[in-house]
């Protein structure tokens, strides 16, 4: 299937290095291209009409290979989270909040909670995606309070 493509991982001005950046493949390139335009895309299965994430060759619900990228609302709720106080590697701003976000369309996405104090995180809080550039070609979807 898709092979790993090289991406421009030159850091944007003022951005601290992030040790692990996503590998952009033919399968995931539409997601990252849209993220660079502050748009959140999700795979939508044409067979069972359900969204899924992360992108796979086949729908994770019914295994149909007939699916398309569609724009998501960017809204979700905080399903779970963990506050991390010790940096896993240089370049992280601590503390950081690892977040499991339940998207309005159904899938869950691992991300970070941003735009609020970690002590204000609450399960079920309403969130909105916001994109943060971490490298020249990489904008990560992160979530903050609505
Ligand atoms: Zn399906």
Image: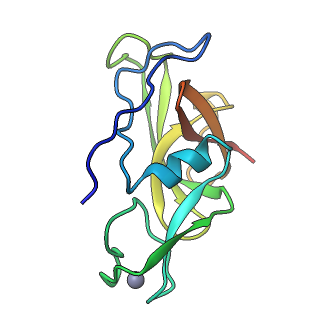
Count of all numbered marks drawn on residues in the image: 0
State whether residue 74 appears in this view: yes
Residue 7 at x, y = what percent?
41, 32
Q: Between 23 and 144, which is closer to the camera in this rendering?
A: 23
Residue 17 position within the rendered picture, expressed as x and y whole percent measured from the top left: 45, 14
Closer-to-camera residue (95/44): 44
* Residue occupying the point 32% across, 19% down: 88
Q: Residue furthest bottom?
A: 47
Q: Hey, which quadrant is residue 136 in on the image?
A: top right
- Can residue 79 be seen here? no
Quarter of the render that holds ligand 1: bottom left
The quarter in which the N terminus is drawn is bottom left
Place of residue 106 in the rendered image (x, y in percent of width and height, measured from the top left): 52, 70
**Residue 53 placement, left or right of 70:** left
Q: Quadrant of residue 35?
A: top right
| Foreground residue among 44 and 79 | 44
For the rendered model, the colour scheme is rainbow
Where residue 75 sits: x, y (%)?
A: 67, 57
Residue at the right extreme of this rendering: 146
Q: Which residue sits at x=42%, y=53%?
A: 28
Which residue is rendered at x = 34% and y = 27% of the image?
A: 20
15 up-or-down from 112: above or below: above
Residue at 61 percent of width and 10 percent of height? 14
- The front one of 133 and 117 is 133
């Amino acid at each position: 299937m898709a092979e790993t493509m090289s991406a421009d991982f030159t850091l944007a001005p003022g951005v601290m290095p992030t040790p692990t950046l996503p590998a952009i493949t033919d399968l995931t390139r539409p997601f990252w291209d849209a993220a660079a335009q502050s748009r959140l895309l999700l795979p939508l299965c044409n067979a069972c009409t359900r969204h899924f994430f992360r992108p796979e060759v086949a729908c994770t619900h019914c295994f149909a290979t007939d699916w398309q990228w569609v724009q998501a609302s960017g809204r979700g709720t905080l399903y779970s989270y963990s506050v991390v106080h010790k940096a896993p590697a240089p370049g992280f701003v601590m503390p950081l909040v690892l977040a499991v976000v339940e998207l309005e369309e159904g899938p869950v996405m691992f991300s970070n909670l941003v735009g609020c104090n970690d002590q204000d995180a609450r399960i079920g809080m309403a969130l909105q995606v916001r994109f943060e550039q971490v490298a020249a070609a990489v904008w990560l979807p992160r979530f903050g309070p609505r």
